[in-house]
Image (cartoon, rainbow, N blue to C red):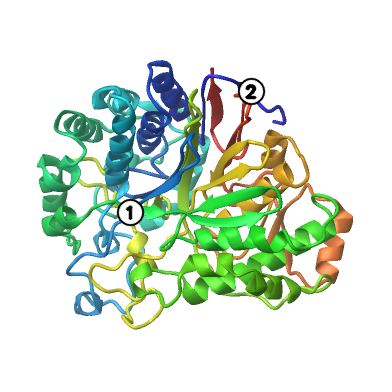
Amino acid sequence: MLNTPRSCRGMVTSPHHLASQAGLDVLKAGGTAIEAAVATAAALAVVYPHMTGIGGDAFWLTMWPDGRVETIDACGAAAGRADAAFYHAAGHDTIPWRGPLAANTVAGTVSGWEMALSWSHAMAPGLPLGRVLRDALYYAEQGVPVTAGAAEITRQKVEELRNVPGFAAQFMPGGKLPQAGDILHNPRLATTLRQLADEGLSSFYRGTVARELAADLEALGSPLTLADLQAHRATHQPALHARIHGADLYNMAPPTQGVASLLILALFDRLKAANADDFDYLHGLVEATKQAFRYRDTHVGDPAYMTVQAQDILDDRKALDRMAASINPDKAAPWPWQSQQGDTVWLGVIDSDGLAVSMIQSLYFEYGSGVVLPRTGVVWQNRGTSFGLDPQGWNGLRPGRKPFHTLNPAGARFEDGRTMVYGTMGGEGQPQTQAALFTRYARYGMPLQRAITAPRWLLGRTWGESSVSLKYEDRFDPEVIARMSAAGHQMERVAPFSSVMGHAGALVRHESGLLEGASDPRSDGCVAAW
């Protein structure tokens, strides 16, 4: 897939074609990019349940036509009862990855939808919430075909999920593994979505839905309570910003790893690399990634506990120069370093007015905690498993603390008037894939779809694997791979198109009003446009 779709009136990209079309239909009905993003996100929660859901967290980056860039942090905090003593009393020295004890943070996604829609409604009256959620509700009630990717992930993870409360009943009807093309229904989630449409999104935290969620969570043994849901609010945050040649880059502030994504691009902007995908290019981006990840893992977490401001390093040109100068152009720096995980969806929307949305939401691992709440059909995230049980340690568990997040939606404004939104799923790979698609497009002039289809790499561990090698898709020039090995990189070949490289997407609006979009052939997605 190399052709870059183009249009002028509106465009949506996401990792599932039905979700992209749900967003486009909202644009056609007169909705804004924000309303289309909520429609797409809600549909993804139903048609891509192994990757996302309303029981997870989300982050928004909104680029307004007047030049403003605003973000929403819809990340939930640890439960008031979630501390080391709670887990020790349950016989655990670490937080379990699956099950009710893994469901220990509030799900913030719906609060992000609510705040974003309030911004949209301040600009225009907007569509009824029931219309925005229409397609998600339909697919939950009437069913949606299981994707090949979902069937395979369920097969891979069945032994750790089979006995988690509610999982088998929802995703293994009759006790059988789902097959590609099977029709999946979630009528309880349809009822929940209808309640949200009727009562308003705040019901998820302070209404009928909240009471049902809290009752199920407590009955199953999660530390979350109704008080935790009621205390949650999405927050409006300034975007992080970095300046490179020809463009201003934007991303999410902590507790996300957005600063790492911007650092990679700021450092690579200082390096020499004549051509995309040659040795200097690949080596330079990998070494910039190591620098950025060391900074991230030393400093980034809940901003309430950080000792530095993430924006400061991005504004410190001398510090960036020193970091770039420390990169050996011929030799790989020592690795590994601590790695992060996660499964996620990214989506982008640009409407006819030029409003652009970069949005990402996640359950963390595949199917999150695996818990499917019986009253609501909601799959709850396990983002809080990233906490350690030493409250004084990095990302240490404390009641009310936000966990470190890999999620980071990105955007850019170019000197020539272009606006770009882009992102990917993939945990540790998110900053790396962002760097690949952005540099190929922006620095080397590669067409947008080709920049995403081209072979990618991943430094570090993903999806629960122990390998921390530099994985590369088997489509790079063999001479480049040989030089990388000779430079000291621990290379590991994977399939020519591998899902471990994430599901990326990007949209660009030119000053003329021309829209360009791309989706990832590694996903089930598409660009929907008119």
Q: Residue at x 43, y 60 (%)?
A: 405
Residue 230 location (% of width, % of height):
14, 53
- SS class of the residue under badge 1? loop
In primary-sequence order, the first of circles 1 and 2 is 2
Element under disc 2: strand
| Residue 289, quarter of the rendered image | bottom right
Q: Position of residue 385 (x, y in %)?
A: 36, 66
- The residue carrying mark 1 is 381
Q: Residues within 10 Å of mark 2 (few under 14, many from 20)?
A: many
Q: Classify 174 as above or below 318.
A: above
In the rendered image, is residue 520 in sight? no
Q: Position of residue 122 (x, y in %)?
A: 29, 32
Q: Amino acid at mark 2?
A: Arg
Image quadrant in which the N terminus is located: top right
Task: Return the residue at label 2.
Answer: 6
Closer to the camera: disc 1 or disc 2? Answer: 2
Q: Nearer the viewer, residue 265 or 370?
A: 265
The amino acid type, in three-letter code, at marker 1 is Gln
State the image coordinates of residue 367 (x, y, percent, origin top left). 38, 49
Q: Residue at x 66, y 75 (%)?
A: 335
